[in-house]
Amino acid sequence: MATLIAFEDVSPTADAELLRKACHGWGTDEKTVISILGHRNAIQRKLIREAYHELYQEDLVKRLEHELSGDFERAVYRWNLEPADRDAVLANVALRKENRDHRVIIELSCTLSPEELFSVKRAYQCRYKRSLEEDIASHTSSDLRKASFCVILQLLVGLVSIHRYQGDEVNLKLANSESNILRNAIEEKAFNHEEILRIVTTRSKPQLMATLNRYKDEHGCTITKHLKDDSADEYTTTLRTIIRCMSDPIKYFEKVIRNAIKKDGTNEDALTRVIVTHAEKDLKEIMEQYYKRNSVSLDQAVAKETSGDYKRFLLTLLGKDN
Amino acid sequence: MATLIAFEDVSPTADAELLRKACHGWGTDEKTVISILGHRNAIQRKLIREAYHELYQEDLVKRLEHELSGDFERAVYRWNLEPADRDAVLANVALRKENRDHRVIIELSCTLSPEELFSVKRAYQCRYKRSLEEDIASHTSSDLRKASFCVILQLLVGLVSIHRYQGDEVNLKLANSESNILRNAIEEKAFNHEEILRIVTTRSKPQLMATLNRYKDEHGCTITKHLKDDSADEYTTTLRTIIRCMSDPIKYFEKVIRNAIKKDGTNEDALTRVIVTHAEKDLKEIMEQYYKRNSVSLDQAVAKETSGDYKRFLLTLLGKDN
């Protein structure tokens, strides 16, 4: 469930006018920006952008990007984009980092529907004039010095591009045989085995879950644990991230937020990403999981680790601005 | 351009009634079936199916499958399906053959738009309760004895799943450097090099064409020729098929038809596939290319090599039934 509290009976034109006033003249009225945009759903925000453009022949997203700054600006910018466009931006930012952050690619691939993922790819092409897949697959020659790098890229390209079967049917016999294939590959320490790649990228989620459950039943231990015990290189870390994100997205995103807050110095990028992309979907469940795991509520943790307008904006999206 | 001559001002209900009459009683009136369905476009055929179902609570596609037989039945069956559904059926038939025919997968991947391909994958899942990608990737253990088999499957899965960039922009510097990468891989006889796989599956068509042109300029020979000279295993054959189909689909399909007709015993499956899937798109260009290459018109060749209702139906789709 969403945490966003979207007000009803609001007028896009009135909102656009108030936002214009908030941006006009000396200094910006951040509180108004938060009180409006932090209480409008995706459709309402779209109507506001359209009304703003009609009234002032100006792009609201760019205007706010210009007026605001720092983590607050980045959060508002992401919040203002269409969901598919936002995901395209997040993916591109992650891929352009010096140390590429593949988590965003994994999150998109493992939690969006094929239709949503298709829209993200279309938005990516429209914005960057290249395909998402080719940007994931491209690399510098220095990357290739890392032995496992090519396999990681293959795994990620497969993950983001394959249109998984969406039905619920599970073939238990297949789950059994593929659980054995995985076990053999792990015992041979052939983590980058083509079969692992094939099973993880092509099987439907329910089928893959059945295979992983079978693995656990047979060997008394989850496959992620076995992957962790036996090796800790970048490839097995990527594989574990994929399995965790696909098996239980709520737990996965709780952990992303937990790490973002806990680590020395908050990771604002990760914190913003999870809150902005989930506030209209399942952030309530992620918050519940966070409380269960940390015995402190997420809004309290966020309030402690952030400050100023950025803090006010995140708390608003968490439904806790009063 | 299409070869199909679709009549205007026709009534789906009247068509459905005539088809019912043609199927009813002792023997089937194949001529009526051909004269109606061979002159209706995809939308008209859909309306006929709907009208038929409304009138007789029966599926026209199944009814005709039951009434007709042999190559004629298979051609009418494919013709009657929605394009995306038809492509899904063609892919499945090809994958289920004892000696898998990967050409259909290559044709779909290299000639459909991302949107069309997405619809085919959806239709495939709907019909077979599995994803197209997982059926391409799955194999028997005896397949794996062939050394190159895994790489072929990886190549095909990449091909069918990746959403290529659709824009026209070409980066000539990149074309130059990737042409060198391809040349190095071929010189080292590392045909299954990850880089070949990456370049062929992820780059946009115009970008890949620029790379292949650059290759030709630099080395005085096309890459397909180099691939053919140096090796003739299944993997390089697949790679050459992909490059030919993507570079010049019209020439490619002309050759499929030429081989289907020329070989000892006509390959009706291939002949039907190309005619049925292109009659509403670009079969006119394929026919022109056929005449240029063989100095005999395609309809004459088809008339010579086929017979009966099958022949009459194909000629109708070629726009030559009088």
Image (tube, coloured by chain):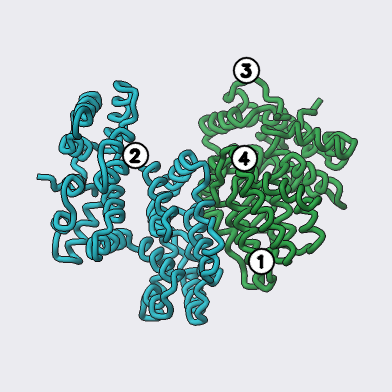
Chain colours: A cyan, B green
Mark 3 falls within which chain? B
Q: In the rendered view, does B160 fall on the left or right side of B274?
A: left
User: Can I make out residue A168 in this image?
Assistant: no
- Viewer-side label of 2, 4: 2
Q: State the image quarter where residue B19 is shown.
A: top right
Which percent across, then down, holds residue A272? Answer: 27, 51
Chain letter of the residue carrying label 1: B
Residue at position x 53%, y 40% from top? Answer: B115
User: Callout 1: 10 Å neighbours few (<14), some, many (20+)?
Assistant: some
Q: How many marks?
A: 4
> What is the secondary structure assignment of the residue under circle 2?
loop
Which residue is under mark 1? B149
* Residue depth check, mark 3 versus mark 1: number of the one nearer the observer: 1
Asked if badges 3 and 1 are on one and the same chain, I answer yes
Classify residue B269 as left or right of residue B83. right
Question: Looking at the picture, do discs 3 and 4 lie on one chain?
Answer: yes
Q: Read off the residue under disc 2.
A: A81
Residue at which label 3 appears: B9
Q: Amino acid at mark 1?
A: Phe
Q: Residue B160: tell me if it is visible.
A: yes
Crowdedness of circle 3 by 10 Å Cα count: few (<14), some, many (20+)? few
How far apart are labels 4 and 1 at the CA level? 40 Å
Of the pair B38 and B258, the residue shown nearer to us: B258
Q: Of the numbered discs in the image, which one, if any, rests on residue B279?
A: none
Nearer to us of marks 2 and 1 is 2
Inter-mark Cα distance, 2 to 1 = 44 Å
> Which is nearer the N-term, disc 3 or disc 1?
3
Query: What's under tag 2, amino acid-wise?
Result: Leu
Residue A81 against residue A168 in the figure, above or below: above
Are the residues flagged by discs 2 and 4 from a single subunit?
no
Name the chain under label 4: B
